[in-house]
Image (cartoon, rainbow, N blue to C red):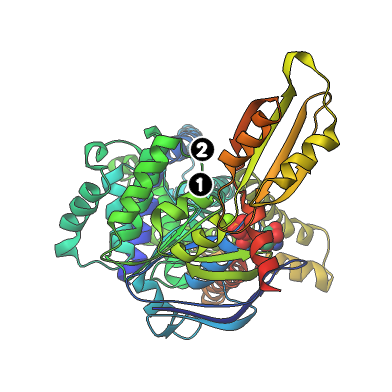
Amino acid sequence: MGNMIVICQKEMKSYFSSPVAYLLMTMFAVIFGFFFWNVVGYFVFMGMQQQMGGRSFPMNLNEQVIRPLLSNVSVIGLFLIPLITMRLFAEEKRSGTIELLLTSPISDVQILLGKWLAAILMYGAMLLVAGLNFIFLFAYGQPDWRPMLVAFLGLMLQAAGLLAIGTFISTLTKNQIIAGATTFGVCLLLWIMEWVSGYETATWAKVLAYLSIVSHFESFAKGVLDSKDIIFYLSVIFFGLFLTARSLESLRWRA
Amino acid sequence: MIKVDGLSKRYARTVAVDNISFEVQKGQIVGFLGPNGAGKTTTMRVLTCFMPATSGTASVAGFDVLEHPMEVKRRIGYLPETPPLYPDMEVREYLHFVGQLKGIPKAELARRVAEVSERCSVADVSNKLIAKLSKGYKQRVGLAQAIIHNPDVLILDEPTSGLDPKQRVETLELIKSLKGDHTIILSTHVLSEIEATCQDVIIISKGKVVATDTMDNLTHRLKGSEAVAIEVEGRNGAELATADVQRKLEQVSGVSRVINKAEGARLRFEVESLQGRVVRAEVARAVVESGWNLTELAPVSVSLEEVFLQLTESKK
Ligand SMILES: Nc1ncnc2c1ncn2[C@@H]1O[C@H](COP(=O)(O)OP(=O)(O)O)[C@@H](O)[C@H]1O
Ligand SMILES: [Mg+2]
């Protein structure tokens, strides 16, 4: 446990002592802000139209602002995750510091958990900065915070799975650009796989759609905790971390 | 302290280490000598639990590297061929991190960091980014990292490679000064470095141990015979027959062999002496007394390759 935290701290310092963390947070905040004000603007516009038309539909911040917004966020995250994980092991392999880690009295699992945890914290920090926009909603409306919390949990679970896969891919190469590009490709694939379900109903299409990481976010975005989706994300996390552990082991053989 | 028995390591195609065995006693400083590709790094990586061997066993302080890797890792300080440094960390921050990795208790950490910084003369750059340090400093930070948890065994892989001569000497001095506290294995492909630093030598070539001996014995064996390169010229531009000169040199007492190394019109020879004989003076006198000019006389330094040849030949 202590060792894992040592590694995690080191990675966090590394994110924040380089431009990476600030770049990620700024990029995410800008893109998120853009979506946010678009959706809010549309919401306000609709509201005014309704008033002028004299009709009154129930307007709901959660349904009409927060839900579409968070679905977008889950996709934006796909694009930023490679930037978070690409360095984790590739750089240690390139610079030779992997020899220090692997010859210290600390287990491979502690190393990879520490790094993965740092990646999750980095992603969380990104979400929090962007989430500051929500203060506005609380100031001018009464959104229900519970579905927001569920959605946040969903985003974190989804990211944790993708970050585990990214961590694994980072163990495969010395080149962080290759690690990043590959992770990006995998993330993209896991997203677009869902699209086949739009026109195809065969079993293979259902399987692909099931494996698509984004499709499991739907329930969270609605504010519903669905155990099927939670289990899916936990399986992705376990799978990614398991592969990382095996990869480190084989790295010792090939070195 | 270190025991290696029948160790082999095979990569996909190459056999890097082939059935080697040796032992290192506590408190010794041992040189691990061999040309590039001999298998030094591979052996060290097995000892430090970085990679498992294909067959054979190795143990450190009585702990087998496969069965008790944690115990072994706690007792080993390792400086890989490229020092494992994080360029974006400051020196103190880095040593602090390594100290934590090696399990030094929180209460002692700051004190240990200060101690090893002092010991390795990097205290004056404690607050500098590692990226900004010179090669010599980086190497010393690498050494500080290796000794921070006061390990029983120090494994140093080519600690002087890539340094300039002054830095080399300083680094070797530093390593020598660590001798009392640690058992040290130090690898290099430079013979003279081992001469200056180590008591014992393990010579490895193409994955096999070709000799283990004390430094004294080894230098004795190597210094047993001497070779000098000479260049001879006729006086006042007179022509000389190569065969005449060679015959004359071979007659000098103590000479075992004369090799013709003519370069164009220049008459050059390499003269080898019998075991234990110094023939430079006699050779010079013979040349001059024959009425020739001796334009050059220089000792031929024994290269590592020749050492291997000598050692492997004398074994047969
Ligand atoms: N990761 C590796 N994969 C394949 N072959 C390797 C690897 N590392 C070293 N070798 C080979 O093993 C042999 C010994 O290498 P090494 O232990 O690095 O020698 P040294 O440190 O004495 O120069 C060399 O022939 C080298 O090419
Ligand atoms: Mg080497």
Disc tally is 2
Residue at point 32%, 55% (across, down):
B176
The subunit carrying tag 1 is A
Residue hosting label 2:
A35
Q: Is residue A105 visible to the viewer in this orientation of the structure? A: yes
Residue at point 38%, 50% (across, down):
B142
Q: Is residue B141 visible to the viewer in this orientation of the structure? A: no
Say what secondary structure mark 1 lies in.
helix
Q: Is mark 1 within 8 Å of ligand 1?
A: no
Q: Which mark is residue A69?
A: 1
Q: Is residue B314 left or right of residue B1?
A: right
Residue A201 location, x and y as percent? 82, 67
Say what secondary structure mark 2 lies in.
helix
Residue B198 location, x and y as percent? 41, 60
Q: Which mark is residue A117?
A: none
Indicate which disc, 2 or 1, sits on the residue closer to the N terminus: 2
Q: Is mark 2 within 8 Å of ligand 1?
A: no
Q: Is residue A20 left or right of residue B211?
A: left
